Image (tube, grey):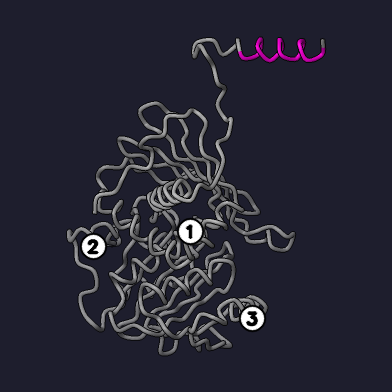
Amino acid sequence: MKHSHPLQNTLSVNPLYLSAPDAVALVHRKGLRHCIAAIADNIRQDFLRWHDFDKSARVANHSAHGVIELMPISDAKAYSFKYVNGHPTNTAIGLPTVMAFGVLADVATGAPRLLSELTLTTAMRTAATSALASQLLARPDSRVMALIGNGAQSEFQAIAFQQMVGIDTLRLYDTDPVATAKLVANLSASCLKLKVCQSVAEAVQGADVVTTVTADKAYATIITPDMLEPGMHINAVGGDCPGKTELAAGVLAAAKVFVEYAPQSRLEGDIQQMPADFDVTELWQVLSGVRTGRESVAQITVFDSVGFALEDYAALRFMHDTALELGLGQHLALIPQMADPKNLFGTLLQAESATIHAVA
């Protein structure tokens, strides 16, 4: 499917600003399921244009408390970046673990065209990516998913898998029972069958798909080889920076492993534990038919997801186009308006003159 470019017919120097309330209004008007599916479609389209993009691993600044990252990418026409943090202890002081915003800009001029919230949007695009990968890699008859980690991302994952993969039963576990209770309450109208479990081992028993969405920055082994069952597909979503894992090395060794962008995943994903030459397949290769996905009903597959800038590019495309369609957002005076673009200093003189006249 050919897509319209996100920056066509946008000549104003003032970018469109899409606030968090605007994003909520957008999702309410289009529907969450529609938004996730549309973002997944954009991700599919853009991954099929893999070689059109100038790609790099994200830039990360780590601290004792968490990480702040910039995620840039561009093709010949548009550039995007996302600012995003990951601070697992934030919830104790009333802040989200993940907060994000992003920019779309015109490559030909460098002019920013969209400044958007990406906290809500990141949750949708992460779920869309997980479900898209599972469409490719999980057994087609998969109906039961274990969801390990029931925090802020979990409802989006659940709805995406119900919508796009056909999951009808969730087996839930979190070290915090309050998080699981929140998830159960939020999904009460979803028609999903929900089973609260008392351990990871109980949750994964009999699951066709296992999705881990944990937040702790630690070398964790949430899924161990003894929990594996023939034909299982695992989405490891929570391990997304150096020093943070969710899968035991033995799980990776027993599976065929898929990633988004290998240079980044080898630094940040669960495969950071594996040798540098450990064989992985990038998701775009499966989408384009360059390499195979699942090779047998009994094969164990792992999607070692860390989040990649191309997914944010795809999500920003959706938010930009949909905001214009619905008339949401406002144009932000982020760039000085100049009659003479060579006379930046003149903007100060104009302001000074306006102030003098106002006082007089």
Q: Main secondary structure of the magenta part?
A: helix
Residue 273: name its quadrant: bottom left
Q: Is residue 354 magenta?
A: yes
* Residue at 34% from the left image edge and 53% from the top image edge: 261
First in sequence, mark 1 or 2: give its number: 1
Give the Cα distance between marks 3 and 2: 37 Å
259 left or right, relative to 97:
left
333 over 48 or under it: above or below: above
Quarter of the image for residue 247 reads bottom left
Residue 274 lies in the magenta stretch: no
Residue under the image location 56 percent in, 40 percent down: 330
Of labels 1 and 2, the one closer to you = 2
Image quadrant in which you'd find residue 303: bottom left
Which residue lies at the image location 43% right of the left edge and 35% below the top edge?
A: 105
The magenta segment? 347-359
Residue under numbered circle 1: 240
Instruction: Write down the residue under mark 3.
Output: 181
Image side of residue 190 versus residue 310, left or right: right
Nearer to the camera, 32 or 106: 32
Residue 338 x %, y %: 54, 16
The disc label shown at residue 72, or none: none
